Each structure stands twice: as C-alpha cells, then as structure tokens.
Amino acid sequence: ELAARFLGFVASRVLENSECTTARTALLLNVFKSFTSSYLSSKDIHSLASTYDNEVRKAILTSYFNALSVLTEQKVTDIPKGPQSALFAAAVGNEASIYALFGGQGTNEVYLDELQSLY
C-alpha cells in the first residue's frame, strides 16, 4: 500500500514544475520498475489490489494507472509490464466474457458512439 501510494505521489508531481519534468519522470520510472518487480512479478495489479479493502484497493489501482498514464504521456519507452490480467487472458481463451455496463449517460450521440465502438 505504501509503495503504491508513493508511486501515485510521484506521478502526481511529474508535471508540477517544467524544469524538473525530466528528473521526476526518471524517478517515476524507477519507482514504477521497483513496484512492478517487487509486487507484480507473479500476479497482475487487479489480483494484488483485490487482497485489500475497498479504499486501499482504489488507492492502489488509481496510483498504478496514474503512474502508467504519466509515463506513457511522457513517451517513456521501457515501461515494465506486469503479468497479463487473468480476466483478459480468460476472455481471449473464451473461458470468460467481458461486458460493458452503461448508466446515467442517457441516449445521446456520445452514448451511442461509445456503444458502437465497444461493439
């Protein structure tokens, strides 16, 4: 939990000062590599987060994906990847199904475009 929260902290500060963006991106990459090798060597991020209560689970997932997003946005090329999601692997092997749920959007053109894109 602490490592994930630190990952999120660093990710939230990368773009804070343009003079430090390169250094902070390098720090974020090193923290991300450490997090991935320490905690995601044998299970995916969702399996790791599922062992915690809802509040901590949300913090872990948010921190991880924010960090991944910032690294991708900064065009970092050697971002480490953890194991593939068990759900996605099962879906590819036709052992599970994935559905999208919509709620609250109403029936406007954006909703229909999203539905068409997913379909």
Image (tube, rainbow, N blue to C red):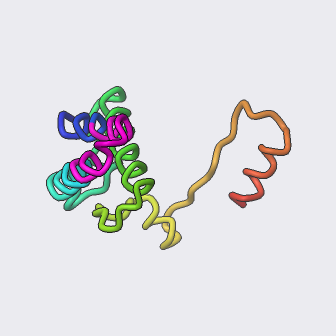
Which residue sits furthest front?
A: 19
The residue drawn where x is 56% and y is 59% is: 97
Chain part drawn in magenta: 10-27
- Nearest the viewer among 53 and 25 is 25
Q: Is residue 68 left or right of residue 92?
A: left
For the point 61% across and 52% down, the residue is 99
Position of residue 14 measured from the top left corner of the image (x, y, whole percent): 33, 41
Q: Quadrant of the C terminus?
A: bottom right
Can you give x and y, in whole percent of width and height, for residue 114 in the image? Answer: 73, 51
Q: Residue 98 magenta-drawn?
A: no
- Counting the numbered discs, the total is 0
Work out whether residue 16 or residue 116 is closer to the camera in this orientation and state it.
16
Image coordinates of residue 95 in percent, x first then y, are 49, 67
- Residue 48 position within the rendered picture, expressed as x and y whole percent measured from the top left: 27, 47
Examine the image and state in which quarter residue 33 appears.
Answer: bottom left
Query: Is most of the magenta stretch helix, strand or loop?
Result: helix
